[in-house]
Image (tube, grey):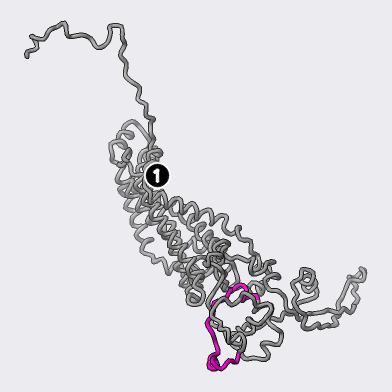
Amino acid sequence: MKIKDIDKSKLVFVHEEDDVIVDELFESKEVGYYKDSWNRFKSNRASFTAFIIICIMMFFVIFGPYMKRYDLPQRSHTDALRFKYLPPKIPGLEKLGIFDGSKTITVGKRYLNLIANSEYGEGIILSGMPQELIDDVNHPDYANVSNLTVKVDYYKYTNFSQSYVPEDYFSKIDDPDALAGVIRTINSKTYEEYLRKGYILDVINIRSERVMKQAPAGILVDGTMYYEYEEIQYTYDVRFDAFMAGLQKTPDQTYFWFGTTSRGNDLFTEIWKGARISLIMAISVLIVNSTIGLILGAIAGYYGGLVDLIFDRFVEVISSIPFLPVLTLLTLRYGTATWVVVLAFTLTGWVSMYRTGRMQFYRFKNREYALAAKTLGASDRRIMFKHIFPNTLGLIITGMALSIPAFVFTEASYSFLGIIRYSNATSVGMLIQEGQVEMQNHPHLLLYPSLYIAILMIAFNLFGNGLRDAFNPSLRGAE
């Protein structure tokens, strides 16, 4: 059919003549660069999960050392040693047969017989002790057996060995597996405190000693005059409840979630204290390295030419200095204070951030938007930090995120090797080194610090990868 054959009466307007046609409003909201980056980051499940894990770890780093109040080592190092190597014990889970404070140990059969037949030994031996040896330690079927491997409640076992062993037990037998030193010598003040609180189990001996003392008698013109007097001082040889005296709790009420170290410290608290020190130093190193590296890298990459040449030669000299000799020399000269370790990591650590900044600014300085801004009269400072820097942000933030676990892992490695040894602090690397020595007998000392390092490394790597994709301008608007 030709157009001229169409009946014109059938051609009518869709709208009336008085109708006004307007464009419909676009309902969606404008999405900015950072909002779009956050949306892309959330859609990456692995990276977002890693971010949540990092937030949880940061919570424990901040509040973990205060969640388990355990100030015994500061009060008495000797008291703390009574609680060394205790296995993990967690409320609730102990009823399921896991993390219940039990441990399999090898002990002399005579000592086990003493525990089994003591009124204070109930519930200590969980399994592995034959009834024949409980009834008769000299049973003929076990005449050639001196030691037995049994499962015990190690909290109760420790308290029994430190508190309830009869005073003459160690003097009558020769048992190298038995724990000695139960009888303690204390002064009058401690004796009165322990007696008042009900910690004293038995008084073995009381000794008195006459001591001559001096006290001020008055003030003369030429000085102070003293007179002497005699005082009787008492010392007590006693046995007392180790858990009650040290922790104000019984073994059934005592929980160390990750166990205790060789010094009797709570491993849960020690890990987060060490993590706090490592992360504080990591953030300090990151701030210094990023500030120096990015400023120098931005100047060299943007201006190029002679400036870039001079900076590159300087960086080549700095980067050629090996890190280990620098760290070793600084620690030998100034010790292993935290500022020394931070200084060692920042002397050459800023080079990688310099190279990243230089590469990115050199890459973007001749892009159309940068040239347009320069044509319109924008200053170099505005072009660098308003137009170029946001486009380099993705790679820079990724590098920052990955530098934190890199520092933690490196610091832990050198602490493990003994190159970094803090005198007044604990690091995770030192805990791992201690756990490696005792891993056969006390595996929890190695397990938990190693898990912390492993989880931190994996989480930060996934987090950094997610940030790299989220801040990539070429993926803007992509789902």
Residue range corresponding to the magenta coloring? 137-159
Q: Is residue 26 above or below residue 392?
A: above
In which quadrant of the rendered image does the N terminus lie?
top left
Any magenta on residue 180? no
Residue 190 is drawn in which quadrant?
A: bottom right
Going by the numbered disc 1, the residue's amino acid type is Lys
Mark 1 crowdedness (10 Å alpha carbons): few <14, some 14-19, many ≥20: some
Q: Position of residue 134 (x, y in %)?
A: 61, 85
For label 1, the SS is helix
Which of the two residues, 202 or 402, is positioned nearer the viewer here?
202
Horizontal side of residue 11 vs 332, given as left or right: left
Horizontal side of residue 386 vs 260, given as left or right: left
Q: Residue at x 14, y 6 (%)?
A: 8
Q: Position of residue 454 (x, y in %)?
A: 43, 62
Horizontal side of residue 216 vs 112, given as left or right: right
Which of the two residues, 434 or 160, is positioned nearer the viewer here?
160
Q: Is residue 313 above or below residue 396?
A: below
Q: Position of residue 243 (x, y in %)?
A: 67, 71
- Extreme left residue here? 1
Q: Position of residue 6 (x, y in %)?
A: 11, 9
Please name the residue that numbered disc 1 is placed on: 42
Which of the two residues, 192 or 436, is positioned nearer the viewer here?
192
Q: Is residue 281 above or below residue 74?
A: above
Q: Is residue 81 visible?
A: no
Any magenta on residue 143? yes
Q: Is residue 255 visible?
A: yes
